[in-house]
Amino acid sequence: MGMQGFIATTSSHSMASSLLPTQPPKKAIRGSTGPTVKFARRTSSGRYVSLSRDDLDMSGELSGDYLNYTVHIPPTPDNQPQMAGLEDRARCGMPACDGLVMTDERGEDIHPCDCRFNICGDCFIDAQKDRGLCPGCREPYKSADYEDDVGDFMGGALPLPTPGKGSNNMTMMKRNQGGEFDHNRWLFETKGTYGYGNAYWPQEDVYSDHGGDGMQAGMMDSSERPWKPLSRKISVPAAVISPYRLLILVRLVVLCFFLEWRVMHPNNDAVWLWGMSVTCEIWFAFSWILDQVPKLCPVTRSTDLQALHDKFDLSSPSNPTGRSDLPGVDLFVSTADPDKEPPLVTANTILSILAVDYPVEKISCYVSDDGGALLTFEAMAEAASFADLWVPFCRKHNIEPRNPEAYFSVKSDPTKNKRRSDFVKDRRKMKREYDEFKVRINALPDSIRRRSDAFNAREEMKMMKHLRENGGDPLEPVKVPKATWMADGTHWPGTWNVAAAEHSKGDHAGILQIMLKPPSYDLLMGNAEDKLIDFTEVDIRIPMFVYVSREKRPGYDHNKKAGAMNALVRASAVLSNGPFILNLDCDHYIYNCKAIREGMCFLMDRGGEDICFIQFPQRFEGIDPSDRYANRNTVFFDGNMRALDVYVGTGCMFRRFALYGFDPPQNKKAPLKMDPETQALNTTEFDADLDLHMLPKRFGNSTMLAESIPICEFQARPLADHPAVKYGRPPGALRVPREPLDAATVAEAVSVISCWYEDKTEWGGRVGWIYGSVTEDVVTGYRMHNRGWRSVYCVTKRDAFRGSAPINLTDRLHQVLRWATGSVEIFFSRNNAFLGSKRLKLLQRLFYVNVGMYPFTSIFLIVYCFLPALSLFSGSFIVETLSVAFLVYLLTITICIVGLAVLEVKWAGISIEEWWRNEQFWLISGTSAHLAAVVQGLLKVMVGIEISFTLTSKSAVEEEDDIYADLYLVKWTSLMIPPVVIAMVNIIGLAFAFSRTIYSAIPKWSKFVGGAFFSFWVLAHLYPFAKGLMGRRGKTPTIVFVWSGLIAIIISLLWIAISPPQGGTTDQIGGGFQFP
């Protein structure tokens, strides 16, 4: 019965513990005298409903249920239990302490550690605060429940339970100064009430007479349990966010006054300099508003995984086997080139997915090999074989992280928090197996090449034999295609190592291979004989795993990664049809095995029916400690994203129904039935404009795909267990096993990944990932928000996913170039937020406007970075004089910037160094990659010319054992030209202005100081860029010196031609040389 059971309350605290004998007759109850017993029932809402004795007599069902129980009265100041004498109690074992050992409410000693070391309450608290180690055995205190003294309570009094999870003695260690149990403190700190648990049902089968037909403790249906929220929103403390918002307002006001002052006070000596500076400053103020306003309302969200487990995975009378009622999840991993994306990295990502902590039968993993390489295929087959050992090993010992490479590379003690005695032996065996697995993966390229050479040689011999038998010319060369062969002696249908017709990266057949079939819905326990490791009482099932390589043919636009993701959406809809989709890059693995459950806490909570996706932050490994180029991007993921629930790439869990282009349910007047017979709605009931005959036009001509749409919508609904859930499903609807796969289903999945399937459909336009931009993730999220869907940004305590990021300067610039190019494409397309619908929220609209406009800031930024040098060369400044008003405005804005940075660091949880690195790389990328993206976008829109910025020079890495060796690798690229020019011009300007000021008759230090200050500001931001050009130990590439010399000569000649020295002309320079 639990919390919803009947509670007996008494009118006197001095009442005896046992009020009623076992199974008393009803007449005895009516005729009994003594203390009055009032019966009440607690409802799921927490209200108590009184029941009279007549009600109990009339309700045979109720009276028969609670006649056999024992009332336990909590000890109160006027009802204290008989405690043992103080002289008989044990003393604390700590040196110089004579305190009494902690006891429970019955006077029995409490030993918080398994070594049973005697300790008093004060010393126990001190030990926990110090290091959390037991003074006796020097081991950490365990938080497990203590059930040592639990006996048979069929005829005796039950112990007083503690509110919360179980009856843990650790929560009962609240003593007063005399060492006695302080119930007043317990009631206050636990928010308990007198009489809590008076009708506490025993944990065994009370009514079964040991026959197995009784009701077990906790066996309640989800509809009978009290409703609990699965997630909650935590606002930033007002002590931090209020000053932050106030400073934003102050800076905004000061900026307005400053800009007004700048416009009204021009520099008549250098109007051109004043005009450029004012224009840039106005744009910077506008850009700052777009970037800052969405940060006004940052939030933090938390989840309740225990409540999720109790609601969907707990056993009940209607679900005695404990089958999960959670919806299914399809996980997508995309890869394209095994040379750039090592198969071992992809295999480790797959293994972390297969070992995730989620119902096995609800998980399906799909890997998209857009290159169609046999190397990737065989690596995935090896991973599927190794998963047979790795996945049960992770479950047996609760391994974290579940990426083998990451797990075996952890520097900390692997035995920490491991309780099984065979862990060390199992880990040693698994490490040996993984080392052999890596050897097999790394040997695959040579193995495939040798195998193919052998089979090709055999084919040549067959051809020559055939020519001789037919009387052909033996000297004629035999032409046999250099095919790539599979292990079974057949041609690989995908891309060959030596490209041939119908076997190249852009021309090959579609391939779909089910590496691991769908598991059974019932547990499959291992034993000690079947495998290398003893998996007794461990579930050895493995999720379904599918390899997919979509068909590619010449003449078709395959739309790069977005097209590959849409092919996975269609194939998975036919095979598993998981209502939710989690996409990961091949180098991003699951670092938190409960990450999917964390996301489900939002999707299955009240109001989760209109959430289109859950975006997790992107975390990276292998980055240099100083994070020279802001690769971690913590300012964005921990700052901006806390107020912006937008889709930014890998690590995002989608609602499949939202990907199909439908509107959220609350915007539709679809009929809603909350009875147990609730069924999935027809497709046309979601979209009134979508006729059944128009389904092929939107989704293609696959009947199975069309039939899967209403099913995935129904399965994605949260439980209808709360009045606020207006679009839910009945409990238990997802416990039914799905149909096994057959040949027809697999054939249909192959047909939907063909290159012609999307012809004359809305795939890529409204359905699935959106085409037409290299940043398909931002556009896809924008389309969903534009239709009225909500989204959630989920930051978990333990990172959900981890991946790799480029630490080399050139690779980082090219990465930023791709993002900025996509933003420019968004700005010039119909996905511009200015054209968004009314359903788009204000902060979302501002964010998407900023996404499309931030690359254009580079035009103003690069001009502003040249202004200090121009000021130094010309001897003028952006203002006529360094007046008090200008300095006050400048000081106030600087203080606001520093204050905002400190407060943002406070509520975002980042460091000052990370904030400063982000500011430095903003200027580096703004003067290089962003400017190139704007030029590339303008040429593409206006002229139709596409420019690609490629690498032109490389230098070799000298030390292979240095994990940060790539950081010092210098690869010259044209993107480096603008920052190099800016740095050289400012350095030359400083030297030129300083020399002129020193040797002038009347030094004008005020103008020099103003220009020098801004020049140093530019050079300080470019410091990481200059350090990257130096490489290791200052080995700067020769091309850098060449460019620097040319730039210095050009600037010097240009300045002399514009402003020749007094007393001479350009004709006198260099013996009559004239600057053209």
Image: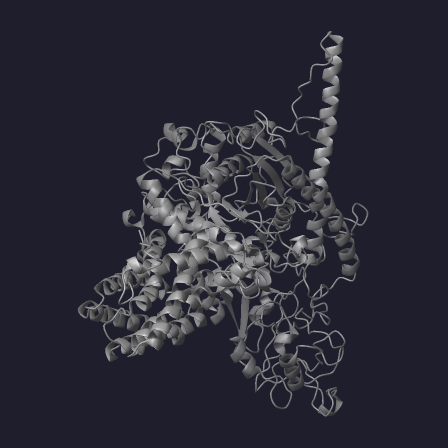
In the displayed structure, 156 sits above or below 1067; it is: below
* Image location of residue 226, percent across then percent down: 50, 61
In the displayed structure, 614 sits above or below 516; it is: below
Instruction: Please give left or right for residue 516 compared with residue 1063 in the image.
Output: right
The N terminus - image quarter? bottom right
Instruction: Please give left or right for residue 391 compared with residue 59 in the image.
Output: right
In the displayed structure, 763 sits above or below 87; it is: above
Answer whether residue 221 is visible to the viewer in this image.
no
Answer whether residue 540 is visible to the viewer in this image.
yes
Q: Nearer the viewer, residue 645 or 576?
A: 645
Q: Nearer the viewer, residue 886 or 773?
A: 886
Q: Nearer the viewer, residue 1018 or 353?
A: 1018
* Image location of residue 227, percent across then percent down: 48, 60
Q: Residue furthest right?
A: 529
Instruction: Please give left or right for residue 238 compared with residue 1006 in the image.
Output: right
* Image location of residue 304, percent across then percent down: 52, 62
Instruction: Please give left or right for residue 592 compared with residue 555 in the image.
Output: right
Residue at the (30%, 67%) spot, across then down: 871
Residue at the (42%, 74%) spot, across then down: 902
Residue 19: image quadrant is bottom right
Q: Residue furthest top?
A: 471
In the displayed structure, 372 sits above or below 327; it is: above
Q: Residue furthest front?
A: 1071
* Image location of residue 290, percent across then percent down: 32, 60
